[in-house]
Image (tube, rainbow, N blue to C red):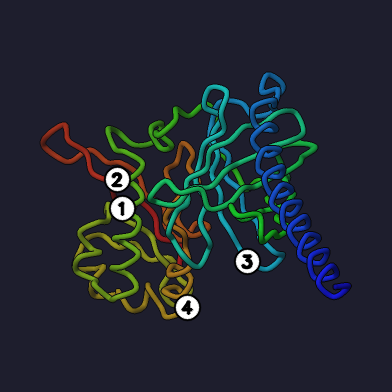
């Protein structure tokens, strides 16, 4: 009889512990939701424009993040440096705290960034999986931005009638041409004349034939390796154009001869 009572008590304790565990997980989710709803966005440090961050998750996984204050929300994307599959972000920011929910391409919530900051230059906190089972520290450092830019038009001040996707697709294309030695195709994408270095001397490349002839001297193995690591999203831009790979290439929108149309073209190669 005592054994039976002991078994019943044990089962009861297990059920109670399981209930408590389940309730705790529910509280965590509600807490995250309530934090988002109660955040005072009027004190946000973010102003109109794009903010570009480099950072890590779990101290060793590099990520790239772009965020934008849209109304009362913070929206954006991020991706792992070694993979270009973007995750969408949506959340809120106040003076010291920022919460960003991440969503995959199907719209499923896959995690949450809960961060704190003294200024927008550095954000650190914890990334938590959607099921609350995994958490990692993260750190984000501001790399640059596009102050005053309209949402969805990062490069509008530089290029004419080209979407962000147009620009990023063009960068992906020229990267592919360089890496795969498609010299004739690449030659079509350059605004001539253009200065390059050959044997440590500055040489003027005047036309497509010059580019094809000197292709291997310009785009060396080392250069190709560097350009292969250059990102194609959230590119730095200023009045000179749009930079790829920390200055390896600059692109801009150029008006075509004979009409009013324009085309994205390479305007500088720094080899």
Circle on res. 222: 4
**Location of mark 1 (residue):** 169
* Disc with the residue nearer the chain's start (4 vs 1): 1
Q: Residue furthest right?
A: 2
Distance Cα–Cα, label 3 vs label 4: 24 Å
- Whichever of callouts 3 and 4 sits on the residue coming sooner in the sequence is 3
The answer to whether 4 is drawn above or below residue 86 in the figure is: below
Instruction: Tell me the element at label 3.
Output: strand
Q: CA distance from mark 2 to mark 1?
A: 5 Å
Considering depth in this image, is 233 or 106 the residue closer to the camera? 106
| Mark nearer the viewer, 2 or 4 | 2
Q: Which residue lies at the image location 77% right of the left edge and 40% below the top edge?
A: 117
Mark 3 vs mark 2, CA separation in Å: 28 Å
The label nearer to you, 4 versus 1, is 1
Name the element at disc 1: helix
Residue 77 place in picture, x, y as percent = 49, 46
The quarter of the rendered structure image containing the C terminus is bottom left
The secondary element bearing badge 2 is classed as: helix
């Amino acid at each position: 009889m005592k054994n039976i009572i002991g078994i019943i008590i044990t089962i009861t304790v297990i059920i109670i512990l399981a209930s408590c565990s389940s309730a705790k997980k529910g509280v965590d989710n509600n807490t995250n939701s309530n934090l988002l709803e109660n955040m005072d966005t009027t004190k946000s440090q973010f102003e109109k424009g794009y903010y570009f961050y480099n950072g890590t998750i779990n101290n060793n996984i590099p990520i790239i993040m772009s965020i934008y204050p849209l109304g009362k929300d913070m929206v954006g994307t991020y991706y792992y440096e070694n993979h270009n599959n973007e995750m969408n972000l949506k959340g809120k920011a106040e003076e010291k705290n920022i919460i960003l929910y991440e969503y995959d391409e199907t719209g499923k919530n896959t995690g949450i960034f809960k961060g704190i900051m003294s200024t927008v230059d550095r954000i650190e906190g914890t990334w938590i999986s959607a099921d609350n089972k995994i958490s990692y520290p993260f750190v984000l450092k501001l790399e640059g931005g596009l102050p005053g830019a309209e949402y969805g038009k990062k490069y509008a001040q530089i290029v004419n009638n080209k979407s962000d996707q147009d620009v990023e697709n063009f960068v992906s294309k020229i990267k592919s041409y360089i890496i795969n030695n498609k010299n004739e195709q690449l030659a079509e994408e350059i605004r001539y004349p253009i200065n390059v270095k050959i044997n440590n001397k500055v040489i003027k490349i005047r036309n497509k034939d010059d580019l094809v002839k000197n292709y291997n001297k310009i785009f060396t193995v080392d250069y190709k390796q560097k350009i292969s690591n250059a990102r194609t999203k959230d590119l730095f831009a200023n009045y000179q154009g749009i930079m790829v790979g920390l200055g390896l290439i600059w692109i801009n929108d150029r008006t075509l001869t004979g009409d009013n149309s324009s085309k994205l073209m390479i305007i500088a190669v720094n080899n």
